[in-house]
Image: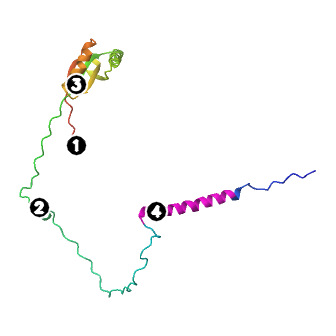
Amino acid sequence: MAKPASRKSGRAGGGSIFTGVLIGLIVGAILAVGVALWATGFNPFKSGKQASAPTKPVTPAPATPATPDTAPSFDFYKVLPDNTSGALPPAAAPAPPAPLLYLQAGAFQRADEADNLKAQLALLGVEAVIQTSEVANKGVLHRVRIGPFHTADEANRTRSLLAQNNIPVTLVKEVPTQQETP
């Protein structure tokens, strides 16, 4: 009977994996050097004058005591251009922000009624927002608003579309609050 082939102890192909990793590292390093030379524009194989005339050896200068240079002294008010008035120029008054226009389709005490109207407007292709706020003596109100519109023409086009579908709306002007910038 033939004797079965014996298996070698240890991992099969362990040496070939190490060899492959080593070859990959060498190829990667050569490519990295090539890309670096290409990116900097340095070409070591370029023909041309390789060596210039021998240079004269540099002789060191005689030692002199080093004295630090004195730092220039600046006076803030002398460096600035001559300005007889010390006051700042008047700042331009900010223009009041243009009011934003909204169309309010309804105000409801129950949130589900506001959602129903919003869905009805969505079927018409009009995007609405529900704003919830606390109103004195009336409790919580859910306002269904469309907008903001920056011009009256935009608001009027949407208003006419809603009037054709028997949805009454009210024009609401809101002046945005101006925030102070630091």
Does 176 appear above or below 137? Answer: below
| Residue at the extreme left of the image, as rendered | 84
Q: Which residue is mark 4?
A: 36
Which of the two labelled residues, at mark 2 and mark 1, occupies the earlier sequence position? 2
Above or below 53: residue 100:
above
Q: Nearer the viewer, residue 147 or 24?
A: 24
Q: Give the amino acid type for the residue marked by disc 4 in the picture.
A: Ala
Give the CA separation, mark 3 to mark 1: 30 Å
- Which numbered mark, 3 or 2, is in the foreground of this view? 3
Outermost residue, right side: 1
Circle 2 residue: 81
- Label 1: which secondary element: loop
Number of numbered discs overlaid on the protein picture? 4
Which amino acid is tagged 1? Thr
Q: Nearer the viewer, residue 178 or 118?
A: 118
Q: Earlier in the sequence, mark 3 or mark 2?
A: 2
Q: Secondary structure at mark 2?
A: loop
Which residue is rendered at x = 23% and y = 18% of the image? 159
Q: Residue at x 23, y 24 (%)?
A: 102
For disc 1, the neighbor class at 10 Å (few under 14, some 14 to 19, many from 20) is few
Q: From which residue to which does the magenta span run?
A: 16-41
Instruction: Measure how far apart labels 2 and 1 are at the Cα level.
Output: 28 Å
Q: Assess disc 3: are there few (<14), some (14-19) or many (≥20) residues with their C-alpha within 10 Å of its C-alpha.
A: few
With 69 as the anchor, is 116 left or right in this view? right
Q: What residue does disc 3 label? A: 154
Label 2 close to label 1 by CB (< 8 Å): no
The residue tagged 1 is 181
Residue 64 picture location, percent across and down: 30, 86
Separation of residues labelled 3 and 2 (CA atoms): 51 Å
Residue flagged by tag 2: what amino acid is it? Pro
Mark 4 vs mark 1: give the one in front: 4
Question: Real-space Cα distance between discs 4 and 1?
Answer: 47 Å
